[in-house]
């Protein structure tokens, strides 16, 4: 993966997963290009809406891949600051702590450091995105009946990476002058999940104030 932010040390190369590419020339690629073009217009509320005549599952799939790539890159910029020593638990401020379980390899939630948790999380998301039965990339292959619940779980977990970055590493983000990039990405993410009601309000609580602030600027 070409790195836009200088050299990476051995730690960050582990957590900064390979970018998930949508095959060029596919319908999903066209949808992604459409999403990028409408984002450029600056009206995020409009940009996240389902384009006319498009399939909701496919729109959610394309955007989920895009958010995975964005968070991958954002977290990749700060991995050297997110260590076993600095973040021995996966938290989003003092009131919210996350324990990892994926239901298959790790059934009982385990307490682990933030870098470990995020590594588990991003690897798990990557496995879902690479699964053709869940995220079909070929035209005409239907999405599974449980697609929406899988997408909701992915987005709920990706939110936790944003929450951890904002609560524990915002100073580093500002030092790197990445805050505009982080805020734009998160605002896009939040407007998208709000548009399709994809994450329970309770799950969003760690960043509730920020979410309200981002929303009020847009009214």
Image (cartoon, grey):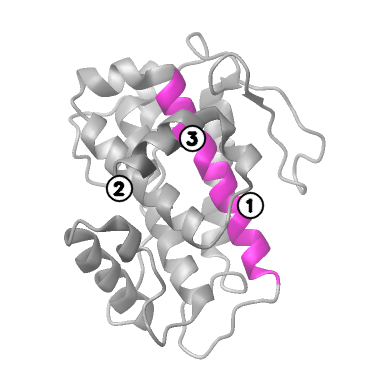
Magenta span includes 145: no
Residue at 32% across / 65% down in the picture?
Answer: 46
Looking at the image, tell me whether mark 3 or mark 2 is earlier in sequence order. Answer: 3
Q: Nearer the viewer, mark 1 or mark 2?
A: 2
* Visible residue check, residue 142: yes
Identify the magenta region.
Answer: 146-167
Magenta span includes 153: yes
* Visible residue check, residue 82: no
Any mark on residue 153, and which? 1
Q: Is mark 3 on a helix, strand or loop?
A: helix
Looking at the image, tell me whether mark 3 or mark 1 is earlier in sequence order. Answer: 1
Q: Residue furthest top?
A: 85
Spatial CA span between label 1 and label 2: 27 Å
Instruction: Find disc 2 in the rendering and name its residue.
Output: 218
Which residue occupies the foreground of this view, 52 or 14? 52
Which quarter of the picture shows residue 89?
top right
Any mark on residue 161, and which? 3
Any mark on residue 77, and which? none
Residue at 58% across / 43% down in the picture?
Answer: 157
Spatial CA span between label 3 and label 2: 24 Å
């Amino acid at each position: 993966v070409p790195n836009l932010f200088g050299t990476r040390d051995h730690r960050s190369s582990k957590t900064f997963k390979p970018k998930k590419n949508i095959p060029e020339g596919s319908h999903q690629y066209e949808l992604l290009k459409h999403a990028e073009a409408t984002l450029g217009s600056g009206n995020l509320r409009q940009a996240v809406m389902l384009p006319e005549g498009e399939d909701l599952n496919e729109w959610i799939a394309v955007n989920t891949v895009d958010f995975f790539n964005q968070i991958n890159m954002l977290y990749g910029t700060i991995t050297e600051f997110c260590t076993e020593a600095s973040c021995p638990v996966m938290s989003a401020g003092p009131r919210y702590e996350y324990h990892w379980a994926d239901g298959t390899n790790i059934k009982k939630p385990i307490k682990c450091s933030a870098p470990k948790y995020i590594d588990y999380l991003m690897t798990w998301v990557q496995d879902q995105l690479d699964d053709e039965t869940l995220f079909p990339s070929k035209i005409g292959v239907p999405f599974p009946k449980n697609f929406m619940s899988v997408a909701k779980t992915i987005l709920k977990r990706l939110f936790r990476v944003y929450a951890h970055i904002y609560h524990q590493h915002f100073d580093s983000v500002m030092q790197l002058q990445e805050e505009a990039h982080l805020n734009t990405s998160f605002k896009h993410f939040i407007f998208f999940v709000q548009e399709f009601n994809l994450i329970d309000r309770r799950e969003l609580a760690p960043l509730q104030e920020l979410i309200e602030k981002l929303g009020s600027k847009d009214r």
